[in-house]
Image (spheres, helix red, strand yellow):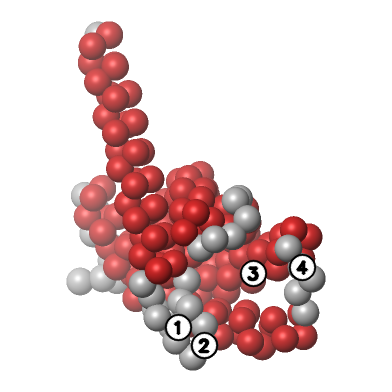
Amino acid sequence: MGAAQSRRIEERIARELLLALVLLAGAMAQATLLPRVFGSAPNVLLLVVICHALISGPASGARWAFYTGLGLDLFADSALGSHALAMLAAVLLAALPLAWLSRNNWLLPLLGVALGALAYHATLVLLMSLLVAPVGLGSYLPVVLLPATMLMLIPALPLFLAMRWLEGRRRGEVPIDVY
């Protein structure tokens, strides 16, 4: 019994380390390789983490957000912990209020991404204003927040549906509205 239990713990630790490494690699790719679209870099990892939190729940989404945020802090040359806190705020604000909605509701990813992007940018602006230098909200809102949110809303629904389908296949269930 003890050997089987330790093997399960070791497998869980190995899966968690693999998840952390994959998300760190994604953060490195986002911070270094992604082009700027309309003057704004797409925050693909925030979109993926919010969609995962909406599908799997806030606890699993918070783990993903923490790993991704630390990776972005390391590779984006920002204050350590600022992106991690912003990602956690985005996941919690997106997943907790919308937990009562069904995963089959197609408005769920759009509302979640909009709320999450707002929380992410608000937390990041607050932290940058406190730690680095004041940020002018008059220029930040139309130049950064609005384009970044629109860039995230465009692929939100297809990504959510694909992730929900993959999660259903992993669990052995078939969603009714996806064939």
Label 1 and label 4: CA atoms lie apart by: 23 Å
- Looking at the figure, which quarter contains the C terminus? bottom left
Identify the mark nearer the N-term, 3 or 2: 2
Q: Position of residue 154 (x, y in %)?
A: 43, 83
Q: Position of residue 150 (x, y in %)?
A: 52, 84
Q: What residue is disc 2 on?
A: 39
Label 4 and label 2: CA atoms lie apart by: 21 Å
Q: Tell which of 126 and 102 is nearer to you.
A: 126
Label 2 and label 1: CA atoms lie apart by: 5 Å
- Looking at the figure, which quarter contains the N terminus? top left
Badge 4 local density, few (<14 within 10 Å), some, or many (20+)? few
Label 3 is placed on what type of residue? His
Q: What residue is disc 3 on?
A: 121
Label 3 and label 1: CA atoms lie apart by: 17 Å
Which residue is depicted at the point 46% across and 77% down? 42
Q: Nearer the viewer, mark 3 or mark 4?
A: 4
Label 3 and label 4: CA atoms lie apart by: 15 Å
Q: Is residue 143 above or below residue 80?
A: below
Label 3 and label 2: CA atoms lie apart by: 16 Å
Q: What residue is disc 1 on?
A: 36
